[in-house]
Amino acid sequence: MGDLEPRAHFQPWSTDNDPPSGSLPAQIAHKAVLSEWPEMAMDMHNRLLSAYFSENLTVSNWDVLAELVSSIGGDSNHFLSVVDEKREIFTNDVISEHNEAINQGITAVPTVLINNVLPVPGAQETETYINWIGRIIERVENS
């Protein structure tokens, strides 16, 4: 993956940290940040990606997630309080979004939805996206 996109800074798991037990805690963490600090939601998204793919951090561990929130300028104690208070709501939101994706035929992570109709599954080379977007533009111009 790192060879396809050097800017991704992908690091195969090589630390003593346990791999995540699942993705739900990280997704709940993102929902909590979006709820409390919407202006930092993209920072949290990027921080989660870096923590997992580059730093090999256990992004299913709530202490790690609280540290990530702190690293982007959020209050880690407030974050943990919000998670405790709204965990069920955030969990249901994540599960609902997951089910919606499955119902739309999306089964791979990542999947990019081009023009709200064309799912492109898995990590792809940039050229793949350029080709698909070019085809969509051609169809629009020819119709």
Image (tube, rainbow, N blue to C red):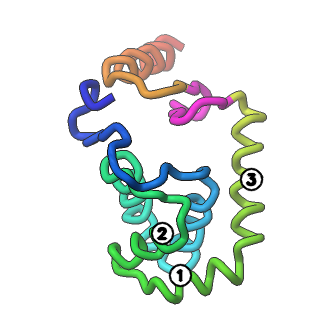
Q: Pinpoint residue 49: horizontal percent, then vertical percent.
A: 40, 51
Whether residue 141 is situated above or below residue 63 in the rendered picture:
above
Determine if the magenta segment contains residue 109.
yes
Q: Earlier in the sequence, mark 2 or mark 1?
A: 2
Label 3 Cα neighbours within 10 Å, binned few <14 / some 14-19 / many ≥20: some
Separation of disc 3 and disc 1 at Cα?
A: 20 Å
- Image coordinates for residue 126, horizontal then vertical, percent: 32, 24
Q: CA distance from mark 2 to mark 1?
A: 9 Å
Task: Please give the residue where the numbered disc 2 appears in the rendered image.
Answer: 65
- Residue depth check, mark 3 versus mark 2: number of the one nearer the observer: 2
The amino acid sitting under disc 2 is: Leu
Write down the residue under mark 3. 95
Magenta span contains residue 53: no
The range drawn in magenta is 106-119
Residue shown at 44% from the left, 18% from the top: 132
Q: Residue at x 66, y 30 (%)?
A: 107
Q: Is 61 positioned to the left or the right of 46 in the image? A: right
The C terminus appears in which quarter of the rendering? top right
Amino acid type for the residue under numbered disc 1: Phe
Q: Are marks 2 and 1 in contact (CB under 8 Å)?
A: yes
The residue beneath circle 1 is 79
Q: Secondary structure at mark 1?
A: helix
Task: Give whichever of discs 3 and 1 has the lower sequence position.
Answer: 1
